[in-house]
Image (tube, grey):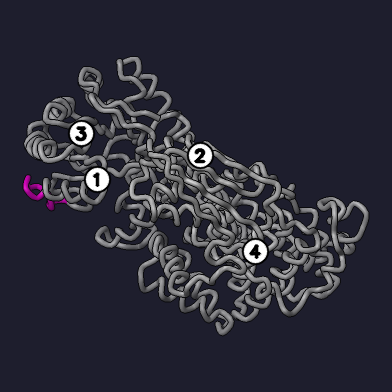
Amino acid sequence: MQLDLRDRIVEPSYWPVVMGVLNVTPDSFSDGGRFVESDDAVTAALRMIADGAAIVDVGPESTRPGSSSVSVDEQISRAIPVIERIAAESNVLISIDTTKAEVARRALAAGAAIVNDISGLRFDAQMPAVCRDSQAGVVCLHMRGNPQTMQDDPQYHDVVEEIGSYFGERLESLEKCGIERDRVVLDPGVGFGKTAWHNVEILSAIRRFRSLGRPVLIGHSQKRFLGEILNRDVDERTSGTIGIAVALAGTVREQAPGILAAHVRELGGQGAATIMGFGFKAPPTSAAYVNGASMHVLDFEPMWSPPNHQLSITLPVALALAEAKRLPGREVMASMVKGIEIAGWVLEASGLYDPKLLRHHPPGLVGPLAAAVVASHLLHLDAGQLRNALGIAASRAGSVLANIGTMTKSLHCGLAASLGLDAALLAARGMTGNVDVFETPRGYVETFFDEFEHSDLLRFGPPFRVIQPGFAIKMYPSQFATHFVITAALNLCRRIADPQRIEAVRLTTPVMPYIDRPCPATGLEGKFSWQFTTACALLDGEVTLTSFTDSRRFRPDMERLLGRIVLDMRDDIPGRLDRMRVEVAVTLTGGEVLSAGCDGPPGAWGAPPIPEADHRRKVRDCLATCLETAEVKQVIDLAGETDELESTGIGELMGILANPRTYDTRH
């Protein structure tokens, strides 16, 4: 998705980028009057650049709702000296926010490269010619009416569909004026003729706009809809801005939770359980659906043996029911122990330790059963009702491995949690299923497994599987087998002063074809690639959430190194996560070969445990993406004493996890 800007080209490897907004006006809604002096404006711009802004947008006219037009001469006097100085002191891309052709022409001559026109080049008949002749980039924004009228009862049949149609028409019109599509950025106009909920829908649909083949600009910072959601004044909306910015970064990589939250909210229903991070309540089945997907989408939750994601299929159910029914924390813990137990013993009975034997992604295979057990405990179902719940849940089992590496993978956990909970709720109302679903011909076992030791299911009980064999704590947000090559590669990285000296890399691993992805198509897919995770560790000396962005995937150094990695998957190496080993060998310029192996990454079964300080750091870092420091401490304290929480304790915890940075939990 290349963007041509006069004499500069922005390549796909640079997305996403941050635009810093510099309003040189006395009346802008958030920073009016702060940068009317040129020295103050330039200082602010340089600070933005130092903080990571790739574009500085200079605005000489406020476009807040109800604002009045500013003359051409006044806009020029405000903007041009600032643009000239920014251009002289940096190489940053500069855009001019104006609807006036003469202002744009003067700004482009002063050093700007982009025209950011809220009218989509419609208000001034000369604007298309100025942009065409200068070869400037163009930001085409969607707006109903003008700043004076745009917030007068904005209504849409389908806001996303209507904006998409507008963009299609504008792209064709601009091409007829001689402005190529490669020079256009699309801005759906958050806050320009939209209600707060319209803006939320837009944020959830960014990928649909990107399907038009052009970069998408989102200008959400501190806008009125955040104030409506947060119930805070403009000076107090920064936290909401940060929360939305983090969510937007996720939509470029992993958009599933946002799509799912919007979907569930539209379905409606009585809100009794919190959707974490999205600030609203929904029926418990819907909350389990979204929260289960959110817990799994980063592939950062604990790993179990045999391989599964027990936490993401049991905890969402326990939290949803405990909050809705005001149950104490000890019931949450007891229900999860039971759910983890049944999931573990079903997989143990099947012998599915080696990932290459799997035909289904385990959360979808056993998750509905585990979730039904969790819910049955919390709903106080008797033995007969529990058997019916399992019979119902068995008809909801299964998940396609081909969806690993896509957003749908996270739905395997969310759906398992939701469908298992729903099965228990139906059983509580008298719905029946096959009460012998494990043993019966064409039942659960016969449908999904080639081998199955039924007697293993009778081993339910102490020492519970939550303790023995327990779980492995992930320190890298990727498929667990890749942690072996990451660990070995990080060991080598410390011995390689310059990664550019790497001439070749050889990986020796067990046979796991589904993570043999030499050229992952996205950063998300890179989570399931031996090659990409190895390259991240060797090049960056770390593997973090930002390692799996599309921009990191397509940087030149990554492209170069991926082409030099050879994978040797061998049948004689066990594929079991608790028995496997990998070797990473790196050949450097001059012929020197360095190698390292790993038979257990940090936190794995049999490996040294993760230091408590490191584990807490991971927890704090994850929570800090959405919560303030004091709230992070509250969550850690409450979660650490879950078994002692009274009937209101889970509700208190979920109230914090609703993400008050972004949403007012009273609504």
Looking at numbered disc 3 in the image, what kind of residue is underneath it?
A: Thr
Is residue 230 one of those drawn in magenta? no
Where is residue 270, by image quadrant? bottom right
Label 4 sits on a secondary structure element that is strand
Instruction: Tell me if I can see residue 396 in this picture.
Output: yes
The residue that label 1 is drawn on is 20
Q: Give me the residue at 72% from left, 58% from top.
A: 353
Q: Residue at x 72, y 70 (%)?
A: 341
- 603 lies left or right of 10: right
- Earlier residue among tags 1 and 4: 1
The span picked out in magenta is: 32-40
User: Cβ–Cβ below 8 Å for labels 2 and 1?
Assistant: no
Location of residue 295 by image quarter: bottom right
Cα–Cα gap, marks 2 and 4: 29 Å
Determine whether label 1 and label 3 are within 8 Å by CB.
Answer: no
- Which is more foreground, mark 2 or mark 4? 2
Give the Cα distance between marks 3 and 4.
56 Å
Residue that lies at the very extreme toward the right in this rendered image: 441
Calculate the distance from the C-alpha at mark 1 to the C-alpha at mark 3. Answer: 16 Å
The amino acid marked with disc number 4 is Trp
Q: Report the residue marked by disc 4.
A: 304
In reply to whether residue 35 is colored magenta, the answer given is yes
Q: Earlier in the sequence, mark 2 or mark 1?
A: 1
The CA span between labels 2 and 1 is: 38 Å
Q: Is residue 355 above or below residue 339?
A: above
Q: Nearer the viewer, mark 3 or mark 2?
A: 2
Label 1: few (<14), some (14–19) or many (≥20) C-alpha neighbours in 10 Å: many
In the figure, is residue 192 to the left or right of 514?
A: left
Q: Residue 68: image x %, image y %?
A: 18, 40
Say what amino acid the circle numbered 1 marks: Gly
Label drawn at residue 98 = 3
What residue is drawn where x is 65% and y is 79%? 331
